Image (cartoon, helix red, strand yellow):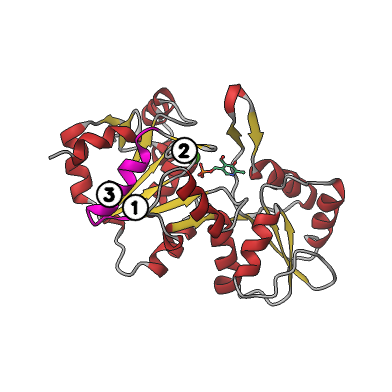
Amino acid sequence: FGFKGCQKIRGPQIRNLLEAKDFILFDCDGVIWHGETAITGAAKVVSSLIRHGKNVVFVTNNCTRPRENYVHKFYRLGFTDVMLEQIFSSSYCSALYLRDVVKIRGQVFVMGCDGLRRELQGGGRPLRGGGGRDVKAVLVGHDDKLTFLKLAKASCYLRDPDCLFLATDNDPWHPLSGGRILPGSGSLTAALEVSSGRKATVIGKPSRFMFECISSQFSGVEPAQCLMIGDRLETDMLFGSNCGFDTMLTLTGVSQLEEAQEYRDSELAANHSLVPDYVVDSIADFLPAFEE
Ligand code: PLP
Ligand code: CA
């Protein structure tokens, strides 16, 4: 029982770490961009990794857009060599879960954005966002058009114990500029958990399912070859630990170094899964690693 983790690393140590890893998994918001603004140096880091032959994938809990929209966003923000196949969002993984894991036959009642609904339709299944007597699953995610009626309907469908209860992610909130916050999917999941008396199955980080989606599409991924880079301890670092990856916290987002150190020094063993192996100030700290 040591006080391992939270190792601040730079130049040559980052280079050694990257040399040892074949798969680099990036969280998006807080790591490579803030909303619509790329983090300085991030686009260069991503393209350098790709040029050096690394498998780079993006693992985001943002369920509000289909993957096609992400390709455009990446391009718009200067990440010009990112392709659809590299993007794993909680909406895309929810579509895979419904199609391939539970092989849903009836309808899915979606409490979420239009982008989530579009992603589900892309999954090649007749997943109508509506409702009706044939509802076999309720999927809750960030919903910018939430109404009390939707919450009431979803709660009613969940009275049926055969109706699955899924959440794209359980993120509590997200930072906006100027100190404001955006309530996350987790706040809606919580409402529905209370009204239904049930617990949702979470698809996004920290659930291991996102890694199953990645390994089903990239053959031969070994956890020991993977590095997960994120900004939130409770989702990204826990996801990495759950999957057996090395983890890195970047300090451009939600979580602070002090919180990571508190988890590290905590006597509660479960908290140690939230501790990053490595810490950097910003992804831009990778840039010297690519210089000859
Ligand atoms: N969900 C929503 C609705 C968001 O706005 C954000 C971040 O802005 C996220 C999730 C978190 O995304 P990520 O997992 O890329 O940090
Ligand atoms: Ca993030």
The reply to whether residue 246 is visible in this rendering is no
N-terminal label among 1 and 2: 2
Q: CA distance from mark 3 to mark 2?
A: 17 Å
In the image, ligand 1 is in what quadrant? top right
Q: Residue at x 75, y 49 (%)?
A: 192
Q: CB of mark 1 within 8 Å of CB of mark 2?
A: no
Residue 108 x/y as whole percent: 72, 66
Q: Is residue 34 above or below residue 206?
A: above
Q: Nearer the viewer, mark 1 or mark 3?
A: 3
Q: Is mark 1 within 8 Å of ligand 1?
A: no
Name the residue at the left extreme. Answer: 292
Q: Residue at x 56, y 55 (%)?
A: 69
Q: Quadrant of the C terminus?
A: top left
Number of numbered labels in the structure image: 3
On screen, residue 274 versus residue 278, left or right, reads right
Residue 36 x/y as whole percent: 53, 38
Q: Is residue 288 above or below residue 216?
A: above
On screen, residue 139 versus residue 69, left or right, reads right
The magenta segment: 40-55
Residue 168 x/y as whole percent: 61, 54
N-terminal label among 1 and 3: 3
